[in-house]
Every structure is written in C-alpha cells, then in structure tokens.
Amino acid sequence: MYPGTNDPIKTTREAEVVAVPAGNTLMLPLGTEVVVTQALGGSYTLLVPSYGGLFRLASKDADAIGKLPPVAETAREGKKLTGEGLEAGIWESLKTCYDPEIPVNIVDLGLIYDMQILPLTDGTNRIEVKMTLTAQGCGMGTSIAADARSKIMELPSVSEADVMVVWEPPWTAEKISPEGRTLLGIS
C-alpha cells in the first residue's frame, strides 16, 4: 500500500485513468472511492473497488485525489524544448514511468532500448521509443507504454509519440543502472 494511507478517499472531480494492465482509458466520476496503492514518478496507482481493479492516474490529474503535480512538471509547462533540452526532457519524463509492481523507473531498469527525435515540418517533434519488459509474459506492457507515451506527449515541443514494446535483445538484470540496483538491493 501507499505509505501512510490505507483509507479510501473520494475523487474531487471527474478524472481520466488508465486500466492496469489493459491500458484502456475511462473517466472516473466525481466522488468515486479509491485507495492509493502506489505513488511513483508523479503518477498514482489507484485501487477502485467499484470498477474492480487497478488504474493509473496521471500526475496532471493529481488534484482529483487531493495531491499536487510534481514541481518539475509544473515548471516545464509551456517551455518549448529543442535539441539537447528536448532530449533531456524526454529522458526526465521516461524516468517518471514505473511498472506498478517494481519501485524503479523504466530507464533505470534498462527497459528503454532506443529513443529517436524526429523533427516535423510544423516545428514540433515526433518521438519514437523502443522499450522492452522484464519478462515477455508481463501483462503490464500496454499500460507502461501508454504511461510513457502520455508523459512524452506532455512536453510542449512534442506533437506525436510512439512507444513500441520490443523483445530483441531480451532484457537481463545486467541492464539495470547502478541507481536501480541500489533501489532493488542488488549488488
């Protein structure tokens, strides 16, 4: 459970959520009872008894459960990013994406295999990401990829994003960053 809260809370407004692991979106109505089970990277995993499952709430909608969005996200709103700044912003966004079952972001887990920035004629960019999962049988792929895409799309200079789950090369624990190893207690 999310530290310090096991108590149900009610949404203070209608909010869009993404089903875990299916990845489909739906609108939770005002007053829906939820329990926050995890809060990592600014997004929240919610247990929603009336809908019978887990759902991810984006950081931009944190106010619907009485939370504030991260300062970093608020600070970058409206800033046009280019070049190295855009690349850094994309990596920062990807570092806010987590598997709901693992407390390490997808970058430090070594799940991101490739990221391309493709300039478009209108001055915006298309971002293409290739990522994998820790196991091919993991049912979270759609949900994690949707979260990554959503966070990339929040960047002002981005008008298109595609996050593809790939299986080659197979993921191994050696791909975990030193920071990720520390968080997981791996030497």
Image: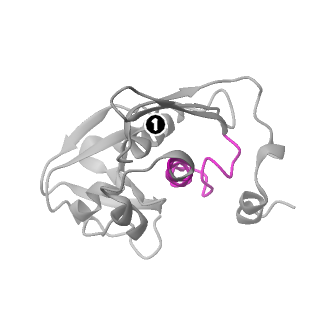
- In the image: residue 30, left or right of residue 126: left
**Residue for point 41% across, 56% down:** 43
Q: State the residue in front, 79 or 187.
A: 79
- In the image: residue 107, left or right of residue 140: right
Q: State the residue in front, 122 or 137.
A: 122
Q: State the residue in front, 65 or 159.
A: 159
Q: x, y percentage for residue 11?
A: 19, 59
Q: x, y percentage for residue 12?
A: 15, 62
**Residue for point 24% across, 64% down:** 63
Q: What residue type is labelled 1?
A: Ser
Q: Give the range drawn in magenta.
A: 86-111
Is any atom of residue 99 visible in this view? Answer: no
**Is 102 contained in the magenta span?**
yes
Q: State the residue in front, 29 or 70.
A: 70
**Residue for point 29% across, 44% down:** 17
Specify how the rendered protein is coloured: one colour
Mark 1 secondary-structure assignment: helix
Is any atom of residue 71 visible in this view? Answer: yes
Count up the numbered dots: 1
Q: x, y percentage for residue 36?
A: 37, 61
Q: x, y percentage for residue 22?
A: 41, 31
